[in-house]
Amino acid sequence: MSLAGVWLTLAAAAPLAGSAAADPDVEYVVRLAVVRGAPEVRVRAEGLRVLDADVRDVLLRGADQELSLRPEGEGIRVSGVRHRPAGVLLASRGPIRVDGRSLVGELEVSLEKGRGLLVVNRLPLERYLEGLLGAEMSSSWPLEALKAQAVAARTYFLHRRLEREAEPFDLSATTLDQVYKGIGQEAARTRQAVEATRGEVLTWGNLPAETLFHACCGGRTRAASAAFGQDVPYLREVDDPDCQACPQRVWSVSLPLERLAERLAARGELRGAIAEVRAAPGGELVVVPAQGGRLQLSPRRLRQLVGAATIPGDDFTWSREGQALELRGRGRGHGVGLCQWGARGMAERGLGYRDILARFYPGLSLRSLF
Ligand SMILES: [Zn+2]
């Protein structure tokens, strides 16, 4: 398949209504879930317009005060509006503040069954990437590292979009996908990194690759098969001597059993005190509560339940020391794909973004999509 074929595959997989033109700002729009499961959303913008998402009737025009949106029955109650639409669009010429975060583009608010409000921000891909770089890395990082991250994030979005065509959004604005904190994170250097790599993506078999990335690998990245039990040919173990400066290159954490029991109870996984923790095949842990039963967890699942603020990465060994588990690990995040601190180290040594991408995604081709 030719490059034009790639473009057609991507475009056919998620066409946008009325966007026959090949303008990338129209063709590549990110649907980003910025709020999920909220009982209330507060929005404010200069001259904010509120529209019924179905029929596009304007419900409120030029509202300058803060508006409150809440689920009510099968609809959404907007302060000052009698009608209860099933979904609303929010639009403004300037940024829209949602729960304190500044966003650009169009916002759609809808009900997620039994979960509260879902807010999806639609914005052009390149604009999204500018904000993302400041949140995923820092605008003070070397340009070549930011450029590598821009290509990885652009490619990751296109990959996810193909998978989530039937879903209400492509990405969520958290570490589940890619961190995005709004337009406050943009800076001249992040714009420069996006512009310098405009339209560049990494492909595998003529499709955008699953270009995962993480904060720091601790010296060697992990294969997708080891981290997620799924073999991806270009997500394999590679040596990375360049993330020495990462604060969590190696780490140890003491996790009291009492705190582990609290966290597991809070997440609805088990009740009561923990009697024992045993090792299981494949590096898994078996937690045995005093009142009986058992809970088997992978290190990754344990980190998700306890929280990334306590356990930095998925790659660790553990031992029982008295009434605590001693965790010894390396790296921050899942350890698969591009290592952000490694990219920074390589850029500081004078290497370019192509060298960085070639190390962390062996076998992929760098191509211009637009
Ligand atoms: Zn690394």
Image (tube, helix red, strand yellow):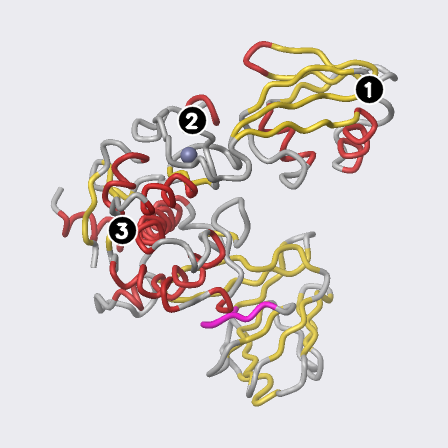
The residue lying at 62 percent from left, 39 percent from top is: 308
Mark 1: few, some, or many residues within 10 Å (few <14, many ≥20)?
A: some
Q: x and y percent of residue 247 in the render? A: 54, 39
Q: Is residue 258 above or below residue 50?
A: above
Could you say which is closer to the camera, residue 259 or residue 122?
259
Question: Label 2 is placed on what type of residue?
Answer: Arg
Mark 2 or 3: the one toward you? 2
Residue underneath mark 3 = 10
Task: State the CA–CA distance, disc 1 to disc 2.
Answer: 31 Å
Name the disc covering residue 323, or none: 1
If the picture is divided into quarters, which one holds ligand 1? top left
Residue 268 vertical placement versus 167 (above, below): above
Q: Position of residue 106 (x, y in %)?
A: 47, 72
Question: Disc 2 designates what residue?
Answer: 222
54 within the magenta span: no
Query: Eyeballing the image, is 338 above or below 141?
Result: above
Kindly tell me whether mark 1's CB lies below 8 Å from ligand 1.
no
Label 3 vs label 1: CA separation? 53 Å
Question: Which residue: 63% across, 10% down?
Answer: 280
Q: Is residue 104 magenta?
A: yes
Which segment is the magenta one?
A: 101-107
Mark 1 or 2: the one toward you: 1
Question: The residue under label 1 is which amino acid type?
Answer: Gln
Labels 2 and 3: the sequence-earlier one: 3
What is the quadrant of residue 317 in the picture? top right
